[in-house]
Image: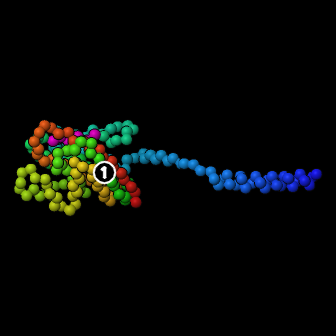
């Protein structure tokens, strides 16, 4: 009887052990990761020409815990082109390593056709653009360091950055007939360390 009980116990343990081992292997699940960054890697700020352009542009940063950085409002005038440079800039933390910066937009309400935002890694100058002497013509970029970004359709801009990088921003809207136009784009900015 003792021998039978021992054999039965061995058989029971032998039957249970593989099930336990398989159960350990078959455990699945999801891992959620939430990341926070205590110091800003980059931020949008008024540029050197912001005060001069005041009235055409306003920057209202959000404070506290918001997903959005703030509201940037840019005014346009009927029958008049507006061209302002170095009014905003994107600054990067001095301790930031090298990586890629991405600026993407979706258009909620388009600006007048031919409206652009300009990006440059050096302060913008009006000599960076060529007008060909025609009134109201969209400035054609001649400086290879300047990138035109559409304000009438979804667009994207990417550039390699580090802690010493500053991106300078300018705007252009051509003249148009009609009442004041309220364009709106939603922007997402991302930095990915390399």
Residue 21 % position (x, y):
70, 55
Asked if residue 186 shows in the view, the reply is yes
Q: Secondary structure at mark 1?
A: strand
How many numbered circles are shown? 1
Asked if residue 170 shows in the view, the reply is no
Classify mark 1: residues with Cα within 10 Å, few (<14), some (14-19) or many (20+).
Answer: some
Q: Looking at the rendering, which quadrant does residue 166 occupy?
A: bottom left
Q: How is the image coloured?
A: rainbow
User: Is 77 in the magenta?
Assistant: no
Q: Residue at x 73, y 55 (%)?
A: 18
Task: Please tell me whether residue 75 is drawn above or below residue 42 in the rendered image.
Answer: above
Which residue is disc 1 drawn over? 104
User: Is 72 in the magenta?
Assistant: yes
Most foreground residue, 135 or 1:
1
Q: Point out the image quarter for the C terminus.
A: bottom left
Q: Residue at x 34, y 41 (%)?
A: 68
Secondary structure that dominates the magenta span? strand
Q: In the rendered view, does 22 fall on the left or right side of 60?
A: right
Q: Looking at the rendering, which quadrant does residue 108 occupy?
A: top left
Q: Residue at x 22, y 44 (%)?
A: 110
* Image: magenta residue range: 71-76
Residue 190 % position (x, y):
36, 51
Q: In the rendered view, does 113 fall on the left or right side of 62?
A: left
């Amino acid at each position: 009887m003792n021998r039978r009980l021992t054999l039965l116990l061995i058989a029971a343990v032998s039957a249970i052990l593989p099930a336990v081992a398989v159960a350990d292997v078959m455990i699945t699940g999801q891992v959620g990761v939430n990341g926070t960054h205590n110091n800003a890697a980059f931020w949008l700020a008024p540029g050197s020409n912001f005060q001069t352009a005041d009235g055409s542009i306003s920057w209202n940063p959000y404070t506290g815990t918001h997903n959005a950085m703030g509201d940037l409002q840019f005014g346009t005038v009927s029958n008049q082109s507006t061209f302002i440079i170095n009014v905003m800039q994107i600054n990067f933390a001095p301790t930031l390593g090298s990586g890629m910066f991405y600026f993407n937009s979706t258009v909620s309400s388009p600006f007048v056709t031919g409206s652009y935002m300009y990006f440059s890694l050096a302060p913008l100058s009006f000599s960076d653009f060529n007008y060909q002497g025609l009134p109201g013509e969209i400035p054609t970029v001649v400086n290879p360091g300047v990138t035109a970004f559409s304000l009438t359709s979804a667009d994207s801009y990417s550039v390699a950055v580090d802690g010493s990088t500053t991106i300078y921003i300018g705007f252009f809207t051509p003249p148009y007939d009609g009442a004041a136009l309220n364009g709106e784009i939603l922007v997402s900015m991302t930095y990915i360390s390399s």
